[in-house]
Image: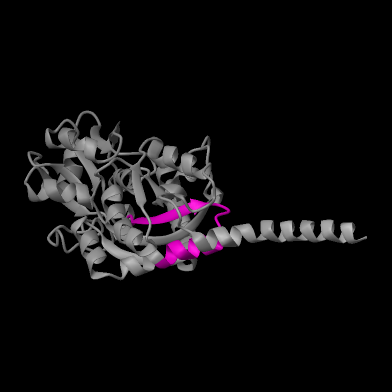
């Protein structure tokens, strides 16, 4: 009888130990380096603004955070990799609107938004409709006239299908009634030489990529594709002010973890992001990178994502007509 009681006691203790493991692991988090995959090219707006935030997050969490650019397939290569990662908080993805738009535009994705858990949003960033400095078009309407007179479709730099920049370009062409032919690039930075040299006629670029070229006189910004003017280029009108409000888009950046990541881990990451975004240093870094701090916690970020998905669904319908 005593032997049986001893065996049962040991079994119960083992079960309690197993049940306690996730909580203990969450409490110990982070105990090793955290890897964050950026779905776009190194040096691009997403990469630069991510580093502006996670450097301070690493200090708050007292952990090493490795930022790894993994571009390709309009964000899907990174998304697939993170969707298959262990849900332990040690592999995250920098999320952007492609997570909402790609499922609406592609039927063969090997990942789904349901495979991710939102952590938080950290930034918003404008994009600019730009042309080579040598272009005769000095306004959006002048470019539209130029495109309508062209015997063949003018080409635009496409840094990735499903990105806000690509979709806003398509929305602009649709609303303006002009034909634009995409030329594919792995992100916005690789398209810069061809834009400067006039090998492509136009492009929508993220702010951090556009600013140096516009300020250096190599590209001309015709419009800000966001809803409000930017303090970086205050003289550049919004696309709505230029007469094409239907091409307005919003670029945002946040973090997602694999679905099933413990809530306690999500809360720690959310808290670290909130604390980092509240610092003057991070706010200034984001401004220097062409964006602005725009923190949303997990709950508010989830509500934002639902609205963003609907907006992209509406945009995709317009392009498909």
Q: Is residue 145 left or right of residue 304?
A: left
Regarding residue 139, the answer to whether it shows in the image is no
State the quadrant of the C terminus: top left
- In-front residue for pair 132/205: 205
Q: Position of residue 37 (x, y in %)?
A: 39, 45
Q: Which residue is depicted at the point 93% across and 60% down?
A: 1
Q: Position of residue 119 (x, y in %)?
A: 46, 60
**Does the magenta run of residues contain 251?**
yes
Q: Is residue 229 left or right of residue 92?
A: left
Q: Position of residue 9 (x, y in %)?
A: 80, 61
Q: Is residue 117 left or right of residue 139?
A: right
Rendering quarter of residue 291 = bottom left
Q: How many marks?
A: 0
Q: Which residue is depicted at the point 20% across and 53% down?
A: 223
Question: In the image, which residues are magenta?
Answer: 249-271
- In-front residue for pair 38/309: 38
Rendering quarter of residue 308 = bottom left
Q: Position of residue 165 (x, y in %)?
A: 30, 46
Regarding residue 186, the answer to whether it shows in the image is yes
**Does the magenta run of residues contain 86?**
no
- In-front residue for pair 77/154: 77
Outermost residue toward the front?
A: 2
Rendering quarter of residue 68 = top left
The figure's colour scheme reads: one colour
Q: Which residue is depicted at the point 33% across and 55% down?
A: 249
- In-front residue for pair 75/250: 75
């Amino acid at each position: 009888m005593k032997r049986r009681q001893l065996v049962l006691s040991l079994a119960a203790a083992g079960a309690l130990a197993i049940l306690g493991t996730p909580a203990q692991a969450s409490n110990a988090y982070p105990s090793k380096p955290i890897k964050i995959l950026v779905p776009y090219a190194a040096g691009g707006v997403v990469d630069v603004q991510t580093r502006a935030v996670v450097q301070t997050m690493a200090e708050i969490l007292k952990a090493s955070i490795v930022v790894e650019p993994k571009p390709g397939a309009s964000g899907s290569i990174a998304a697939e990799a993170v969707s298959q990662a262990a849900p332990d908080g040690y592999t995250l993805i920098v999320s952007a609107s492609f997570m909402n738009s790609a499922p609406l535009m592609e039927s063969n994705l090997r990942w789904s938004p349901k495979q991710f858990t939102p952590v938080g949003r950290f930034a918003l960033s404008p994009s600019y409709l730009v042309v080579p400095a040598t272009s005769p078009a000095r306004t959006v309407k002048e470019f539209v006239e130029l495109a309508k007179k062209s015997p063949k479709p003018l080409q635009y730099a496409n840094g990735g299908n499903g990105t806000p920049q690509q979709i806003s370009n398509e929305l602009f062409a649709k609303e303006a009634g002009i034909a634009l032919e995409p030329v594919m690039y792995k992100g916005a930075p690789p398209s810069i030489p061809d834009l400067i040299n006039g090998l492509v006629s136009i492009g929508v670029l993220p702010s951090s990529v556009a600013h140096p070229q516009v300020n250096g006189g190599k590209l001309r910004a015709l419009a800000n594709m966001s809803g409000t003017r930017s303090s970086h280029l205050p003289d550049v009108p919004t696309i709505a002010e230029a007469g094409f409000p239907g091409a307005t888009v919003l670029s945002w950046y946040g973090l997602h973890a694999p679905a099933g990541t413990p809530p306690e881990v999500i809360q720690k990451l959310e808290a670290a992001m909130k604390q980092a975004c509240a610092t003057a240093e991070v706010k200034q870094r984001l401004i220097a990178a062409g964006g602005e701090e725009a923190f949303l916690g997990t709950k508010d970020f989830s509500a934002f994502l639902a609205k963003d998905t609907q907006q992209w669904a509406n945009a995709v319908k317009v392009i498909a007509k």
